[in-house]
Amino acid sequence: MTQSDTQPVIPVREFFALDVRSLALFRVALAVFILLDWIDRLPDLRILYSDEGILPRNLITGIHPFSLHMLHGSVWFQAILFAIAIGLSLLLLLGWRTPWICFWNFLFLVSIHARNPPMMQGGDVLLRMLTFWSIFLPLGACWSLDAARSSAKPPRDVVSPGSVGYVLQLCLVYWFAAAWKWLGPWREEGTAVYLALHVDHFPTRLGLILREYPDLCWFLTHATIWIETLGPVLLFLPFNVGLQRMLCVALFIHFHAGLALTMELGHFPFVGMIGWLALVPSGFWNRLVPRLRSPEVAKLTLVVDPDRAKTARRLAYLKTFLLLQEIPLREARSESGEQARCRKQGGWALLDESSELFSQEAVRRLIACSPLWLPSSGLLVRTVSNWLSRPGGRKRPEPVPPGWMPPSGLMANTLAIFFIVYIVSYNVFHFVGARAQELPPEERAKWFVVPDQFGQLGTALGIDQAWGLFAPQPGRYVGWFVVVGEQKNGELVDVYNNAPLSWEKPKFLTLTYESGHWRKLRMNLAAPAAYPYLLPGFTRYYFDEWNRRHEGNKKLKSLSVWWMRETTVPPGETPPPPEKILLGTYTPPTLKPSFAKGTIVVLGIRPDGTRIDLMRAGAVVPEGNPDLGPTVPIVSPLYLTVTELANSDAAKYVLDGLARYLFDEWNKTKPDAAIQKLQILRMEPREGGRVEPVLLVESLGK
């Protein structure tokens, strides 16, 4: 039989095989990152996650997945959930009941992401998706408590619907990022990296230097497109699969390292690097492990008193922790006197070719042979030795199924295949739908429209995703925010920084953000169409916090958020001066807000021509008099936001998007009273006491 008879022409199995040692490395890195993510959020527990902070739960609108953090708004409840989440990340690090722990880590990530949507970044979505696919993978088959507890020998690698889903998920990130970049400033103009580095929220000091070289930025722009397009293809070339995979892993780890060095992108570069660790090929470990293994390990054997079942379990844990799984562990023999000596010396011994080592000497020898190069301090050696020698557990535990085994069988595999098909389809439909929005209405009608329920399923399950990543073009409007408080004595102060008011741009804007999550949240202050509840919550919180800490005339009587809006321009062009835009103003409820330009009315027109007021729970509006006045109360929590924005300098930038949001949100939440058109009107006073409605914007939704 020839080699061509035994090996397939296209080695599909190798394309999706994941080595269990790579999965173990990925598990450790993933768990450490999830742990650090929760610790990073801890200082903001009150301000960002409780009802005492910026976003009380009653303000958040839209469709979101189920969130444990939305069940109660108190600080103590959030603290309990944080403590549980930190514990779950530690259990994942240790590898205990790994598939179930992956599921709970995923659930808690979805929960915290749904609690504060304006903070969400691409790195959060990628972290969530990597954790999701981990549920279907044996992350605990190696270097874990699960591996130490089970006598079952794990496979060298795994090929399953879960491994297929994981590999495809990584590919989708880059393929759709490339698809979004295929036009405009990326491929046609080659200015995207230059423009992205001029979005001053992001560049590091190295990025500030890099953006001074437009030709190099042009090269990096095109290199990014081709890396994202062709890089994942290396995983599916039927030649030397292991070598090509190693090249692909190295390529993308360096790609993400370059992003991290030049731009502050939050989690994304680091989560991207972690994701590729699972694809390290077996050949890498086959070459590395023998180099790290001490030659003495082959001469060692661990023996344990047969009546010390717990000691045997502890020795298995120690072997796993020290990466010495190849040392055999057997019961001490009574005929040679091993059992008697073990009982006398703590219940176990380490044998080599010529001697027996007990207690602290044995522990010191094991640590010396470990590839972890741990310091064999006296305290560490004594602690481990005492732990191993503790009595108890004469009865041998019954064999248990491997704790690292992921869900299997027909139902689990069918579910994994369903998620593969759904996630691929979700990315395709999201991309096509977004592209269709750029077409004229008559052309857009020819495109296949996917029902909203298709996307809502992904949102509800926490597996929704989009990988634009600075595409189709980097943001053209950037700038910085100034939170102005007017004190009762008439002085103006910078409330956010607790400093004298200054309109000057910070010297290094990237360093003004407390964390990546704060960067995203503050950037979204200028996106009221996407997050209409953010500005009201933000202004109310900082108004109340200032007044809580100050007395007398130092208290505020109003607070305003201003956007010093800058425009990024292509190389060679001079940017215009910053534009000063009022985003919103907050006054306490005891003061009656006055709108000099008139009252705002949001009208919805139903298919039968009936006109209803969306701010007054759909009250019918008579023809010729759109303002119902005080006779019908305003109940919508968005009324002040809409009014402030409509009467501000930001209206021309954001009002159209806000109208589309209000249109879609009304039809989603009240399908029985669906509208086909939405109008935002301003009631302008005229001579003789007349009031005339002026149309500000009209929307037909999407």
Image (cartoon, rainbow, N blue to C red):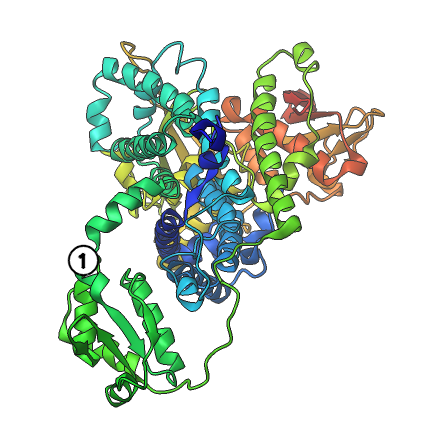
623 or 299: which is nearer to us? Answer: 299
Residue occupying the point 34% across, 37% down: 269
Disc 1 residue type?
Answer: Ser
Crowd tier of the residue under label 1, counting other residues whose Cα lies within 10 Å: few below 14, some 14–19, many 20 or above: some
Q: Is residue 662 left or right of residue 164?
A: right
323 or 650: which is nearer to us? Answer: 323
User: Toward which corner of the image does residue 195 lie, by quadrant?
Assistant: top left
Residue occupying the point 34% across, 15% down: 191
User: Toward which corner of the image does residue 91 lie, by quadrant?
Assistant: bottom left
Image position, residue 153 (x, y; %): 44, 59
SS at badge 1: loop
Image position, residue 340 (x, y; %): 28, 89
Where's the C terminus, which quadrant?
A: top right
- Residue ranking furthest to the front: 1
Image position, residue 685 (x, y; %): 64, 25
- Residue ranking furthest to the right: 608
- Residue 109 vertical position relative to residue 304 in the rendered view, above or below: above
User: Toward which corner of the image does residue 322 lie, by quadrant?
Assistant: bottom left
Residue occupying the point 48% across, 26% down: 9
638 or 684: which is nearer to us? Answer: 638
The answer to whether any part of residue 120 appears in the image is no
511 or 543: which is nearer to us? Answer: 511
Instruction: Tell me the residue that label 1 is attached to.
Output: 294
Image position, residue 257 (x, y; %): 28, 35
Q: Is residue 101 left or right of residue 67?
A: left
